[in-house]
Image (cartoon, helix red, strand yellow):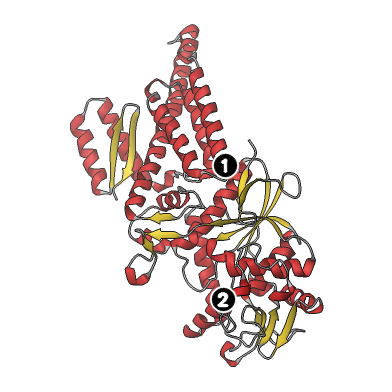
Amino acid sequence: MVLRLYNTLTRAKEDFKPLKLNEVKMYSCGPTVYNYPHIGNYRAFMSSDILKRYLLYKGYNVAHVMNITDVDDKTIRDSKKEKKSLKEFTEFYTLAFLEDMKALNILTPDIMPKATDYIDEMVKLVQKLLEKGYAYKVKDGIYFKISSFKDYGKLSHIDLSHTKKGKRVSNDEYDKTNPNDFALWKFWEKEDGDVFWETKIGKGRPGWHIECSAMSMKLLGKSFDIHTGGVDLIFPHHENEIAQSEAATGKKFVSFWLHNEYILVEGKKMSKSLGNFYTLRDLLAKGYDAKSIRYLLLSTHYRQQLNFTLDGLDASKHAIERIKELVNKLKRKIDDKTKIKTQNANLLKNNLLKKNEHDKIHDKTHDKTITKLIENTKIGFEESMDDDLNISEALGIFFGFITEINKRTDNLSSKDAEIILGFLTHIDRVLGVMKFDDEEIPEEIIELAKKRQEARNNKNYAESDNLREVMKKKGYYVDDTSSGYAIKKIV
């Protein structure tokens, strides 16, 4: 099935075809680095991550650019409050953002350009707009003349003809000819302090919108495949990007525009006054696991509002545990095969096991129904994802598979366990929630669990109970299962 994506530009689902066969050029609006991003911001970055992961899953080569806005009104204002240079201030929050991305297992974009590194490109773009009559200078800056671009509004479908004179549609309180026109370049004012560039178009700094156009076209070309961001960016930011880019080049700027919906927290708009404003760090400090947060952020279709609740985080934690428990069961099946094979090889070497008995032990029939189950799950998962990244439906199919496999774990051969684990890993290329590192559980705890299992095998239940208590005091407990045991951290 072909991948179909909802294009904000056309308000319809369309078959996705990149401009160049098998190569996708994708731009995502990144953070403004003046504070720690909140979970609403990460909903946008997660939506882009799932899109990118699925494109890679389908075999596309993806060139992904995500910008860092390190100069604007907010970064200048807050750096001055903290009495730090703009560079020092923004680098701190850029690093914090990258740490959060890593914690959430969001794939790092191929290029993350900083706006302050592309001032020359912005200046050249503004010069071109001036030359072509799409921009004009006034005493406080250079503005884009919206009336000169006949297709203005085609993304947001906004009609500016009814905007009353004097009514502003953006925050730019500047002396522009028309209240709807937007700033391309802002001339230096004393409030800017030492934040300015001496350029051919004047001493000053860029407007917010010009940054993304300049960086995306420099790195991906005048026309590229996909642009992503939250619905709050449709107007005016993305509308303005289209206007200034297409006015300058005369070419279509982006083929597909994908926008994710807002996030609610406990059914309400996120607000510090309501006490429901969370950064990733806030949630981690409360003891929630980054995988559970990732799962909750990705589990609702990107074009639906996501209600982020603490109960939802608990449910997400349970979903992650279900995957982890199955993975551990499968790994134990595979490990058992290796152990038995080694033991029997030693017995065979010492003539304590006949060759035909050795072969018989390892001649386990592959369950063909497992292959069929995997095939059907793969088809269903991909059909759902091909339908505008319908992740909710895809997850339902995925967990249906996990339920079916859990019914069969006691009778699985090690070969089947390897096949199933390989399939789970394959699907996780999209989900990104299965990175269960052994180092998450201290070696000391792993050794205690092994000793406890040996005590149980030897029917030494007093020692087994004692070791369980020792583990509990260290913050871990053991779940006994039909196929072995699972170590879990006490939260």
Relative to 200, is 5 on the left or the right? left
Mark 2 sits on what residue?
A: 169
Q: What residue type is disc 1 on?
A: Asp
Relative to 136, is 160 on the left or the right? left
Q: Is 464 situated above or below 203?
A: above
Taking depth in this image into account, of 230 and 63 the one nearest to the observer is 230
Q: What residue type is disc 2 on?
A: Val
Q: Position of residue 205 (x, y in %)?
A: 65, 82
SS under mark 2 = loop
Marks 2 and 1: CB-CB under 8 Å? no
Q: Residue at x 75, y 50 (%)?
A: 19
**Residue 426, label in figure:** none
SS under mark 1 = loop
Q: Position of residue 174 (x, y in %)?
A: 61, 86
- Image quadrant in which the N terminus is located: top right
Q: Is 101 situated above or below 14?
A: below
Taking depth in this image into account, of 392 and 102 the one nearest to the observer is 392
Q: Residue at x 45, y 47 (%)?
A: 299
Q: Is 247 situated above or below 135?
A: above
Q: Position of residue 373 (x, y in %)?
A: 49, 25
Neighbour class for label 1 at 10 Å: few (<14), some, many (≥20)? many
Where is residue 274, by image quadrant?
bottom left
Q: Position of residue 407 (x, y in %)?
A: 37, 25
Mark 1 sits on what residue?
A: 387
Residue that protrudes farthest toward the front in the picture: 162
Taking depth in this image into account, of 152 and 340 the one nearest to the observer is 152
